[in-house]
Amino acid sequence: MAGAVAGGLFNAFAFAGPGFLFKMFDKNGYAEEAKRHNMAMEVLTAEREKYLEEVTDRRNKIAQLRAELAEANSDIKSTNQSLELVRRINELTRKAMPRKPHLSNTYKPSREMEEYMALFGLLAGGAIGGAAYLIL
């Protein structure tokens, strides 16, 4: 705004000095020249306003696009992170589950111990079955 005022004052003084001399030597030419100058100043003012609006709109659009770009970048990062997590989950679910360790995988009782275990199972099962029969 200050530039427009200073420019207008500069143009007024720049035109006033030669205008005074022109007015002294050519009475009718000065009026026409002043009219042409005033028209040119009006056009210049309108063009400057249009220019300032365009520059402001351009700056606002650039700022908006930069904000959208930053948001898109954060969205891309979060999307990439989500996809990486999905990839890891799929990788783990596609692998076979590890086998649950059992004593039978590492220890095989001897033949004699198997006989004692069977005998104990029969005695314990018979005792529990008999007790259940008596209770019911």
Image (cartoon, rainbow, N blue to C red):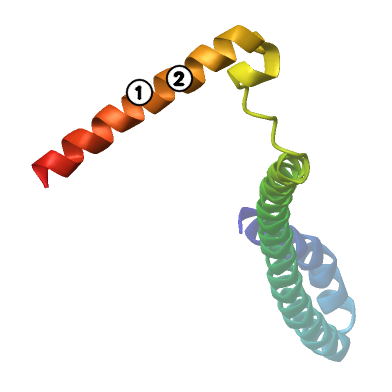
Position above or below: 31 against 131: below
- Type of amino acid under label 2: Leu
Residue at x 68% of width, y 71% of height = 53
Q: Is residue 120 left or right of residue 132?
A: right
Residue at x 34% of width, y 31% of height = 125
The answer to whether mark 2 and mark 1 are in CB contact below 8 A is: yes
Position above or below: 24 against 127: below
Residue at x 72% of width, y 60% of height = 65
Q: Residue 13: image x %, image y %?
A: 73, 60
* The N terminus sits in image quarter: bottom right
Secondary structure, mark 2, is: helix
Position above or below: 126 against 93: above
Q: Which mark is residue 123?
A: 1
Quadrant housing residue 96: top right
Count of numbered tags: 2
Q: Which mark is residue 110?
A: none
What is the distance, in whole Å, between disc 2 and disc 1 at their CAs?
Answer: 6 Å
Quadrant housing residue 42: bottom right
Position above or below: 49 against 75: below
Residue at x 73% of width, y 51% of height = 76
Q: Residue 111: image x %, image y %?
A: 65, 11
Query: Foreground residue, 80 or 13?
Result: 80
